Image: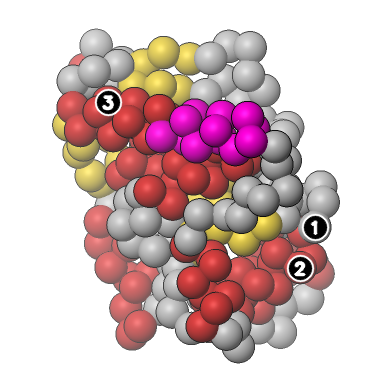
Amino acid sequence: MPSAANIERAYAPSDLSSYSFLERVMIRAVGLALYAVMKLLGSTVKFEVEGWENLEAASAGGKLPIYTTWHNGVFLSTYFWRDRGIVVMSSRSFDAEYTGRLIKRFGYGTVRGSSTRGHTGASIEMIRLMRVGCPAGFTIDGPKGPRHVAKMGAVLIAKKAGQPVLPFTIVPARSWEIRKSWDQTQIPKPFTRARVIIAPPIYVEADAAASVLNAKRDELQRTLEALVQKGEQWRASIS
């Protein structure tokens, strides 16, 4: 089990003592600016939710959902699910210092690692935090893609922690897309509507073999693809 200090560290701003003075100023300033922009834009969005009963099912009996979506929807996902204590995986890069401070202002926690570096230790810490009551979250094609290709992370955490994966998507009616980014990040336009679509939870047995884990990842892939398609149909219907 994680100590009280480890739990506190997950939600506290990271230690910047290894950075130069100018780097520390930059990290704090950029993190605060990003937070201000996200809070301002997010507060103007009108959210409509489909499938809330699936969140209730995933939370029944004291269960903790593993919130799972694609990386390009991280802006609205961060804002919509704020203040739930959700723990996410954060890379050890310099840029991650900005985003780490940003999301912690919205009530998230972080464990340091990624699918490319430090993943095993971060996964173990995430499982430990879930066992003491912290829900988890994944942008399942992150941190570097390929875009809209599900990785195994959420499925493995679901197996080890005994908690359900909760696939969802949030589709803005009007948005800007950062075309040069690997995931084509979506930024909602002010006062837009957005559709939150939550799928039924995916459960993974504690004794699931590798073939079952692969099948569950494929199920997650298909589910997220179907959610995106449903969201695009909604957006077309109101345009």
Quarter holding residue 174: top left
The reply to whether residue 221 is in sight is no
Q: Position of residue 147 (x, y in %)?
A: 66, 30
Q: Is residue 213 left or right of residue 148?
A: right
- Is disc 2 placed on a helix, strand or loop? helix
Q: Is residue 71 left or right of residue 211?
A: left
**Disc 2: which residue:** 121
Q: Is residue 132 rendered magenta in the image?
A: no
The reply to whether callout 1 and callout 2 are in contact (CB within 8 Å) is yes
53 is higher (above) or lower (below) than 183: below
- Residue type at mark 2? Gly
Residue lying at the far front in this picture: please name it.
Answer: 21
Q: Which residues are magenta?
A: 21-32
C-alpha distance separating marks 1 and 2: 6 Å
**Disc 3: which residue:** 41
Q: Is residue 174 left or right of residue 86?
A: left
103 is higher (above) or lower (below) than 12: above
Q: Earlier in the sequence, mark 3 or mark 1?
A: 3
**Disc 1: which residue:** 118
C-alpha distance separating marks 3 and 2: 35 Å
The reply to whether callout 3 and callout 2 are in contact (CB within 8 Å) is no
The residue shown at (47%, 30%) is 29
Mark 2 Cα shell of 10 Å, populated few (<14), some (14-19), many (≥20): few
Q: Earlier in the sequence, mark 3 or mark 2?
A: 3
Numbered circles on residues, count: 3
